[in-house]
Image (cartoon, rainbow, N blue to C red):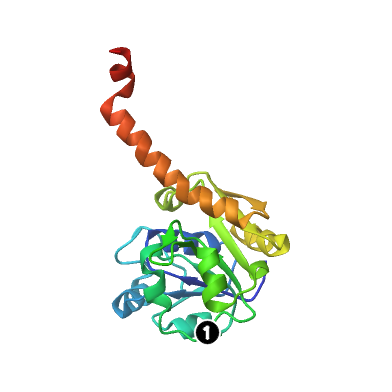
Amino acid sequence: MSTGRIAVIGGGSWATAIIKILSVNCDQISWWLRSEDAVNFIKSHHHNPVYLSDVVIDTNKVHPTSSLDEAVADAKIVILAVPSAFLKDVLKDVSDSIFANKIVFSAIKGIVPDDLLIVGEFLHRRFQIPISHIGVITGPCHAEEVALEKLSYLTVACNETKHAALLAGLMNGRYIKTIVSDDIYGTEYSAVIKNIIAIASGICHGLDTATIFRRY
């Protein structure tokens, strides 16, 4: 399925997993990584040297670069996959028009620090991206399970569902099953709340609350 170049921004586990997923159906993928050493290693050895290093990177399809402008320049779809705490730092030196006429999907879980905004709302306010051109990629899915090609599920959301459907089709495959949603706020807030619930559940399990309550 052809849609022009896709850009993935981020060099961590989730970004690497997304590269693996997209490489099945996409022939032109730009991949931004902060480290020039990592870029050179991937070009030479076809693996991310730090994260999910067992994943083989098809450099005939994937073009790593440490230049954000170069990665995004010819892309129709941009996927942001950096930790929310570092998003503002990654984007601090780019022009306000870098995302003009592009569909930008957030694969980021969390709130943008200081601004206290979900990523989609931050992008809308900071770069004046129309809400119809902002999307969300969320689970249930784990980068390590993608690397092992275990059956995983992704929700791809955008108010303009044709954009979500396009990317969902590109990410759907033998071990990745996708569904489309038009609710970018619900999916993004759910991803944030999930971590809070998970931490609370872990605390309860660690305290063995069932035993505590039985005492009373």
Most foreground residue, 133 or 19 = 133
Q: Quarter-wise, where is residue 120 in the image?
A: bottom right
Left or right of 186 in this view: 141? left
Amino acid type at image mark 1: Asp
Q: Which quadrant would the N terminus be assigned to in this image?
A: bottom right
Residue at 37%, 75% (x, y): give it.
89
Please tell me whether residue 73 is drawn above or below residue 156 in the rendered image: below
Question: For the view shown, which residue lies furthest in the top direction?
Answer: 215
Left or right of 132 in this view: 23? left
Residue at 50%, 64% (x, y): give it.
119
Most foreground residue, 17 or 197 = 197
Most foreground residue, 84 or 75 = 84
Left or right of 62 in this view: 168? right
Left or right of 36 in this view: 98? right
Most foreground residue, 93 or 74 = 93
Q: Position of residue 142 (x, y in %)?
A: 44, 49
Q: Position of residue 128 (x, y in %)?
A: 59, 77
Q: Which quadrant would the C terminus be assigned to in this image?
A: top left
Q: Position of residue 96 (x, y in %)?
A: 52, 84
Residue at 36%, 64% (x, y): give it.
85
Task: Report the residue marked by disc 1.
Answer: 96
Callout 1 environment at 10 Å: few (<14), some (14 to 19), or many (20+)?
Answer: few
Does the rendering let one see residue 23?
Answer: no
Describe the element under mark 1 as helix, strand or loop.
loop
Does the rendering let one see residue 201?
Answer: yes
Q: Position of residue 133 (x, y in %)?
A: 64, 70
Please tell me whether residue 176 is drawn above or below residue 62 in the rendered image: above
